Image (cartoon, grey):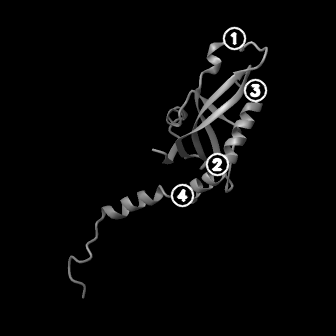
Amino acid sequence: MIPTGVFRFDSRLPVSFLKKISNWFTSAGVSVSHVRKQYERHQQELHRNCIAIAAAAGSPRGLVWSHQQWLTSWILVEDTSTGLITMLHGVNLSFEAVAGGEMEEVDAVSTIRDATAVFHYQDGRWGTGGRVLFNMSPESAIESIGDDFRILASSN
């Protein structure tokens, strides 16, 4: 016979435990840890591709992408309606004016710009469409995109 009180059941434990482990997985059942490790493994290639695609798009007009410094700030989110996993990664960007172009005499061209690069995890792989959100940190980007996203992890 089991002595009374030895195996006390705390009714709060299961709920708090379930909430905690729900943050370990995406809605599709993918481990958040696995997704982050996949991003870290391919990070340099993803960053190169993002900048190459964004620069080829010709935006900002009259400027050439000259330098990027990837920051330590990032937020991993999941779209609650679609399950799409997105990494918002902070980056500082520098530009140079196109020689002979209309921006050549503009002082602000040399200003370092805060931005957030956008990466998506689909079908077990990370990718990028070269989307860069100018004048936004990952924190301000998540505030502007609305309530349809669940934060899975962040650098903070």
Label 2: state its secondary structure.
helix
The N terminus appears in which quarter of the rendering?
bottom left
Tell whether label 2 touches label 4 (CB within 8 Å): no
Q: Amino acid at mark 3?
A: Gly
Q: Which of label 3 and label 2 is nearer to you?
A: 2
Q: Which residue is mark 1?
A: 105
Q: Which residue is mark 2?
A: 43
Q: Which quadrant of the structure image shows residue 4?
A: bottom left
Point 62% across, 30% down: residue: 93
Front-most of residues 30 and 138: 138
Quote the CA–CA distance across marks 3 and 2: 23 Å
Whichever of callouts 3 and 1 sits on the residue coming sooner in the sequence is 3
Position above or below: 64 against 31: above
Residue 100 horizontal/vertical position (percent): 79, 14
Label 1: state its secondary structure.
loop
Point 64% across, 54% down: residue: 41
With 76 as the anchor, is 7 left or right in this view?
Answer: left
Label 3: state its secondary structure.
loop
Front-most of residues 30 and 108: 108
Quote the CA–CA distance across marks 4 and 1: 48 Å
Q: Residues within 10 Å of mark 3 (few under 14, many from 20)?
A: few
Q: Amino acid at mark 4?
A: Ser
Position above or below: 121 against 53: below
Whichever of callouts 3 and 4 sits on the residue coming sooner in the sequence is 4
Tell whether label 2 touches label 3 (CB within 8 Å): no
Q: Which residue is mark 4?
A: 33
Point 67% across, 56% down: residue: 124
Q: Which residue is mark 3?
A: 58
Quote the CA–CA distance across marks 2 and 1: 35 Å
